[in-house]
């Protein structure tokens, strides 16, 4: 008959082990870094386009172990972030300096900064900055369409396409175009540059393009320049295929023979 004492002693030992582990668990949990932010969002409000905006986020180590800042990332190249302290002792604080260039932006804009640390509970924090960017009155160039499919074109024949140019801004738009073999017309009359369009106005322009000796795939770009500060250069594309008379004859002869 087995003696019960060894079994009881073994069970008591296991029980005591778990009691000790559970007793030590809260202490082990407490000895770790803990990152705390004063805030994780900042609204710059209404600002003028072109300004560089700056803000400092304050954070501290509310844990019981050294806090290590591993990395700082931004959502785009227009936003920069600099950390003042990479290592924080318990109770100490650091600052995250964020800079945002509003050049080229308008309206409500949101950007993000990501702060990575060795806090096991919050290893990657997201911080958000917002701004309502006011743009000054300016012209704005728009085309419809930006690409024209001209299909099959006979060699040495002019290529023609039609576009609408619009000024969707608040100031007069001035447009220039220089192309060695292109001519422009509007409303049945020859069109010369610079072309001026009042705010809210549009004009249909017809482009006639000569490409002597060109054969095969056509990808031609016509460059326009304007006083729109956001789009000073705009390209219109003409796509198609230039075919020779001999190619047409060969094509017809081949299909006529097939029909026979």
Image: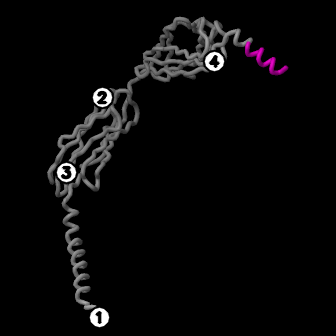
**In the rendered structure, which disc, 1 or 2, sits on the residue that comes first in sequence?**
1
Q: Is residue 259 magenta?
A: yes
Rounded to the nearest whole Å, what is the CA distance between mark 1 and mark 2?
Answer: 90 Å
Dividing the picture into quadrants, the one containing residue 81 is top left
**Label 3, label 1: how far apart the Cα atoms are:** 59 Å
Q: Earlier in the sequence, mark 3 or mark 4?
A: 3
**Quarter occupied by the N terminus:** bottom left
Q: What residue sits right under mark 2 in the picture?
A: 51
Which label's residue is closer to the chain start, 2 or 3? 2
In the rendered image, residue 154 lying in the magenta stretch gets the answer: no
Disc 3, SS: strand
Residue 128's x, y, as percent? 33, 43
Disc 4 crowd, CA 10 A, few/some/many (<14, 14-19, 20+): some
Q: Residues within 10 Å of mark 1 (few under 14, many from 20)?
A: few
Q: Which residues are magenta?
A: 250-260
| Residue at the spot of label 4 | 150
Q: Quadrant of the C terminus?
A: top right
Estimate the x, y position of residue 142 in percent, counting from the top left.
51, 22
- Which residue lies under the disc numbered 3? 67
Q: Residue at x 32, y 26 (%)?
A: 50
Q: What residue sits right under mark 1 in the picture?
A: 1
| Cα–Cα span, label 4 and label 1 | 102 Å
Look at the picture and state if 182 lies above or below 11.
above
Principal secondary structure, stretch drawn in magenta: helix
Residue 210 visible, this angle: no
């Amino acid at each position: 008959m087995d003696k019960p004492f060894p079994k009881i002693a073994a069970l008591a030992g296991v029980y005591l082990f778990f009691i000790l582990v559970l007793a030590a668990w809260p202490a082990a949990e407490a000895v770790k870094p803990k990152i705390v932010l004063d805030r994780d969002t900042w609204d710059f409000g209404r600002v003028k386009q072109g300004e560089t905006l700056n803000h400092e986020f304050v954070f501290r180590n509310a844990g019981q172990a050294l806090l290590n800042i591993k990395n700082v990332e931004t959502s785009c190249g227009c936003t920069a972030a600099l950390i003042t302290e990479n290592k924080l002792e318990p109770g100490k604080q650091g600052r995250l300096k964020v800079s945002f260039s509003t050049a080229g932006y308008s309206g409500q804009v949101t950007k993000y900064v990501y702060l990575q640390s060795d806090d096991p509970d919050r290893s990657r924090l997201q911080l958000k900055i917002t701004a309502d960017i006011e743009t000054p009155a300016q012209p704005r160039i728009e085309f419809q369409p930006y690409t024209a499919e001209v299909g099959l074109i006979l060699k040495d024949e002019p290529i023609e396409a039609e576009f609408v140019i619009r000024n969707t801004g608040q100031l007069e738009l001035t447009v220039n175009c220089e192309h060695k073999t292109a001519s422009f017309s509007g409303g049945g009359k020859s069109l010369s540059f610079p072309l001026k369009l009042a705010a809210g106005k549009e004009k249909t322009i017809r482009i006639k393009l000569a490409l002597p000796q060109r054969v095969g795939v056509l990808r031609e770009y016509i460059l326009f320049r304007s006083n729109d500060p956001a789009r000073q250069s705009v390209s219109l594309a003409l796509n198609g295929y230039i075919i020779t008379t001999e190619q047409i004859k060969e094509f017809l002869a081949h299909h006529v023979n097939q029909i026979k």
